[in-house]
């Protein structure tokens, strides 16, 4: 079966523009995560969706960042008025109900110029 | 957001030797601990997990040890191979953190042939 799919795989945008990053989780997985990874560093938690519960947005670095998950499936991470420090790889992961391990996509590499 | 470390520590081993990668975690109430492997340009890949009520779990060529007294987790890789070269991350999940997966600092493993 298909794994977690993220699009685009690479995105170059100008400073000040808005971007949308898409994540298609594994079918049937109830939990979905977004992380950010800067070059040579670890994974910074951004947001967590679990079923129909209110998302945990505690990791979003500013109000320029937002995410939605429609119909319990596809998720979109939106960054408004992008800044150079937003340049990173954005990783999405999903988990099945009752299981702790998350399965990751390949990530979207965002470059803000 | 909840964050991970600065520049990653590195571990260099000779092919065929055993590797031990260590991780200190922060949340004494975490229920699950997971090790992930991340190869260059890819998303993290699940290796092995362990529940908080266990102190050891073995997989194929890998063993995870959990010491709750000192909040320490280790991953042992037997007979390390060049294909094991990657960055290894520990992660934890706790209900008191909303059930989300939080990553620790990674370690870059380099295997010399």
Image (cartoon, grey):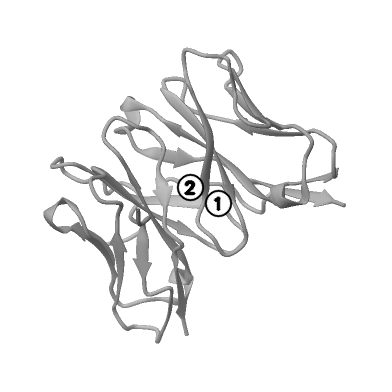
Is B65 or A14 nearer to us in this picture? B65
How dense is the environment of label 1, judged by Cα within 10 Å: few (below 14), some, or many (20 and up)?
many
Residue at left offset 37%, top offset 27%: B94
Q: Is residue A105 above or below residue B49?
A: below
Q: Where is residue B23, by image quadrant?
A: top right
Residue at left offset 23%, top offset 45%: A28
Return the residue at label 2: B3
User: In the visual, does A7 lie left or right of B92?
Assistant: left
Q: Position of residue A73 (x, y in %)?
A: 20, 54
User: In the visual, does B36 lie left or right of A92?
Assistant: right
Residue at left offset 54%, top offset 60%: B42
Question: Of circles 1 and 2, which is in front?
Answer: 1
Return the residue at label 1: A42
Chain letter behind tag 1: A
Numbered disc 1: secondary structure: loop
Q: Position of residue A48 (x, y in %)?
A: 29, 46
Residue at left offset 54%, top offset 40%: B104
Q: Position of residue B34 (x, y in %)?
A: 50, 33
Residue B43 appears in the rendering: yes
Q: Position of residue A12 (x, y in %)?
A: 43, 83
Verify CB contact (< 8 Å) between mark 1 and mark 2: yes
* Label 1, label 2: how far apart the Cα atoms are: 8 Å
Chain letter behind tag 2: B
Is A10 or A27 nearer to us in this picture? A27
Q: Is residue B20 above or below residue B15?
A: above
């Amino acid at each position: 079966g298909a794994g977690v799919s993220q699009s685009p795989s690479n995105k170059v945008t100008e400073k000040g523009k808005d971007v949308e990053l898409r994540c298609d989780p594994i079918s049937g997985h109830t939990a979905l995560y977004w992380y950010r990874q800067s070059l040579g560093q670890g994974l910074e938690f951004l947001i967590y969706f679990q079923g129909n519960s209110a998302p945990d947005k505690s990791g979003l670095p500013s109000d320029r960042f937002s995410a939605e998950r429609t119909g319990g499936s596809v998720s979109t991470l939106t960054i408004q008025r992008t800044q150079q420090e937003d340049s990173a790889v954005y990783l999405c992961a999903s988990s099945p109900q009752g299981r702790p391990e998350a399965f990751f996509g390949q990530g979207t590499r965002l470059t803000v110029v | 957001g909840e964050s991970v470390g600065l520049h990653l520590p590195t571990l260099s081993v000779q092919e065929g030797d055993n590797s031990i990668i260590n991780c200190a975690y922060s949340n004494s109430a975490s229920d699950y601990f997971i090790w992930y492997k991340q190869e260059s340009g890819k998303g993290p890949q699940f290796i092995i997990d362990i529940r908080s009520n266990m102190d050891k779990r073995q997989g194929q060529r890998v063993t995870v040890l959990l010491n709750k007294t000192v909040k320490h987790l280790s991953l042992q890789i037997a007979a390390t191979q060049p294909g094991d070269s990657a960055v290894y991350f520990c992660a934890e999940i706790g209900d008191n953190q909303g059930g989300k997966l939080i990553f620790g600092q990674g370690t870059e493993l380099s295997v010399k042939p």
